[in-house]
Amino acid sequence: MLETPAPGTDRASTARRFPAGRKAELAAYVSEAGQVTVAEIAERFDVSTDTIRRDLDHLAAEGVLVRTHGGAMSKSALPQINTGFDTRLGYQAHAKEKIGSLAATLVDDNSVVMINAGTTTVALARALKDHHGLTIATNSLRLPPELSTDCFRGLYVFGGAVHIADQKTIGPVSFHSSSGHHDLDVQCDLALLGVGAVSAETGYSTSNLEEAAMMSEMMARASRVAILADSSKFGRRLFAQIASLGRADYFVTDAEPPEELAGMMRENGVEILVSGA
C-alpha cells in the first residue's frame, strides 16, 4: 500500500523519505509509461540515478518489470511468446536493422553459414544482399524470401515440426542422404543466432526447450558463432538455456552491455560488437 503524503508534501518528497513507497510508485510509473530511461525516472522522483538503478534492479529481481539498457520497461510492453511474427518484427526494428547490418560484416563471401529463425535474423538476411556465393542453412521459413537471390548459391531449410506463428521449423540440424538411409553430417563456417535473453549468470536462453537444443546443435557444428541480441534482452533469462556466454565468439548488439555482463563476456573471450560504435 502506498504511503499517504502529509498535507503540503508533494509525492516526490514523500517517496524520498519512504523508499518502499518510492519503489511502489516507480513500478506503477513504468507500468503506465511502458518504457522509460533512468534519467527520466530520476527527474520524475528527484533522486539520484544510482538510487533509481538500484530500485530498478530490485524490481526486476522481483519480476515486477524488465531491466533494459539505460532504463526499464513494463512486462506488458514486451513481445509475448504468442505475439504475431509481423508484430514482433516492428519491435526494436531500428536496433535490429543495425545489428543485422553489423553481423553481415562477419560473413565472408563463398562461406557456409547457419542462421536461426527470428526477427533479428530477418534483418540480417536483408543485409546480406551484397554478398556472393554463400551456402545458407536455416530453420526460418521467413528468411528465404528476404534473401537476395544473388547472394547465395545454396539455400537449405532444416526439417522438423513447423511453427506457423513463429515462421520456423524445430528439429534436428541435419539432412537426409538421397537414399534416405542415414543423415548427412553438416558443418558451417559461421552460425548467426538471435536469442531471446542474455545474462551474466545463465548465458544465452530462449523460451522453448526444443529450440534451445536446436540452437545449441547449430553452435556445435560451427567454426565460429555470433550471437545477435538487442539491448532489451540484457539481464533477462528465459526457460531454456542455449549455452554459456563463452560458447560464442562474437556478441552483436545495439548498445554496450551492462558492466557485469560485458566483463563476463570479455573474460570468456567473446568479442562485443556494438552497432554505431
Image (tube, rainbow, N blue to C red):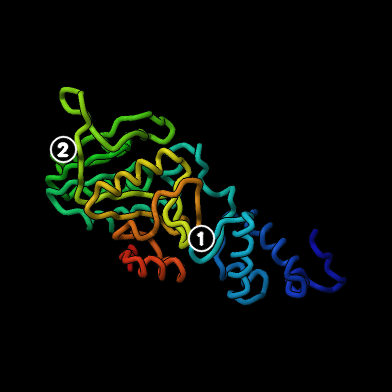
What residue lies at 48% left-to-right and 43% top-to-bottom?
207
What residue lies at 38% left-to-right and 61% top-to-bottom?
254
Contact check, label 1 and label 2, Cβ < 8 Å = no
Q: Is residue 165 above or below residue 5?
A: above
Q: Position of residue 21 (x, y in %)?
A: 75, 65
Q: The C terminus lies in which quarter of the figure?
A: bottom left
The residue singled out by tag 2 in the image is 154
The residue nearer to you, when weighing 150 against 192, is: 192
Q: The N terminus lies in which quarter of the figure?
A: bottom right
Q: Quadrant of residue 54?
A: bottom right
Q: Position of residue 181 (x, y in %)?
A: 20, 24
Q: CA distance from mark 1 to mark 2?
A: 38 Å
Q: Position of residue 95 (x, y in %)?
A: 39, 56
Q: Position of residue 276 (x, y in %)?
A: 33, 65
The residue singled out by tag 1 in the image is 68
Taking the view exactly as shown, the residue that stands out farthest to the right is 7
Residue 142 shown left or right of residue 132 in the figure: right
Q: Secondary structure at mark 2?
A: strand
What residue lies at 39% left-to-right and 52% top-to-bottom?
243
Residue 7 shown left or right of residue 59 in the figure: right
| Residue type at the position of mark 1 | Thr
What residue lies at 62% left-to-right and 54% top-to-bottom?
63
The residue nearer to you, when weighing 15 against 262, is: 262
Would residue 190 be seen by someone viewing this image from the given angle?
yes
Q: Is residue 256 above or below residue 149?
A: below
| Residue type at the position of mark 2 | Gly
Sequence-first tag of 1 and 2: 1
